Amino acid sequence: MKRRTFLKNTLMTAAVVTTFAGLMIKPKRVFAAWPKESFDITDLSDSIKSVYGHDDLSETSEVKLKAPDIAENGAIVPINIKTNLKNVESIMLFVENNPQPLSSGYNLTSKSVPSIGTRIKMGKTSNVIAAVKSNGKIYSASKEVKVTIGGCGG
Amino acid sequence: MSTIKIRAKESNGSVTVKALMKHPMETGQRKDKKTGGKIPAHFIQEVVGKANGEEVITVHWGPAVSKNPYLTFAYSGSKGDNLELTWTDNKGNKDSKSTVVK
């Protein structure tokens, strides 16, 4: 291989690698890919910070979180979250006492209606936190769900 | 057979989508009683909902979502929309299904 071509190629590769590295370091606040890091965190406040970059949540009645008072079966706990807030970018669901508090995240678009529902597993009695990002601010609602039989063991 | 069941219904300009997916949603923390080893994690990580090809929701799920997961969401749309759901799990398996909004 000619020396010049070799140098050129090396430089090109270096440039590409740097660009990629730059992309990787970007905070994952608006995550395009599945946020493994956030799903792995075991502390609630760290988990919230990893999603938003801070854990400044304003509790409001505008976020409606529907969850049972008592879940007889922790393996299937129905959760519904909706809000009247406008320009909702995302809805996140955290379960404080689960091994990893981040349970699920919903990225919305301008066509979405901010209302989602799912069924989750809860290991034990815990606060469930619904966080809604609207106009760059994070609003939340929380509720304690008592679990009689945990749903994470086996 | 598809692993997804969808129902999508329009009312007052808003389409409510209800979906059930067939998936074990293994957390990776459960132990196999016979071998004593851990059952490897196997769960849906992402569900994308598209209406007439345009993305209306992207869902990220962790292992703490129940087995055979249920999802409901809503978007501004109309009857006759082509609604498509696609899930991808942590092993790279995928499935998708579309339905016409009623």
Image: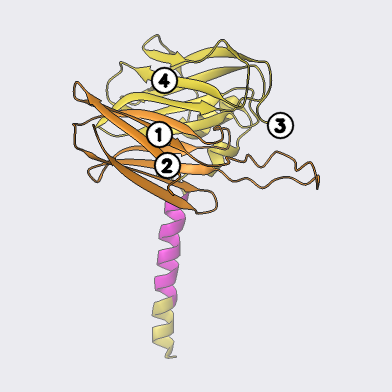
Quadrant location of the C terminus of chain B?
Answer: top left
- Chain letter for the yellow part: A
Residue identifier under label 3: A153
In whole angstroms, how far apart are the C-alphas of marks 3 and 2?
26 Å
Q: Is residue B94 visible?
A: yes
Question: Mark 4 = which residue?
Answer: A81
Circle 1 sits on which residue?
Answer: B19
Could you tell me residue A77's position as x and y percent?
Answer: 55, 22
Judge depth for marks 1 and 4 and give the one in front. 1
Residue at 46% in and 14% down = A66
Instruction: Find chain B in the image and tell me its colour.
Output: orange
Residue A74 place in picture, x, y as percent: 62, 23
Q: Are discs 1 and 2 less than 8 Å apart at CB?
A: yes
The answer to which image quadrant residue B10 occupies is top left
**Which region of the structure is painted magenta?**
A10-24
- Quick one: SS at disc 1? strand
Q: Residue at x 60, y 22 (%)?
A: A96
Q: Is residue A30 visible?
A: no
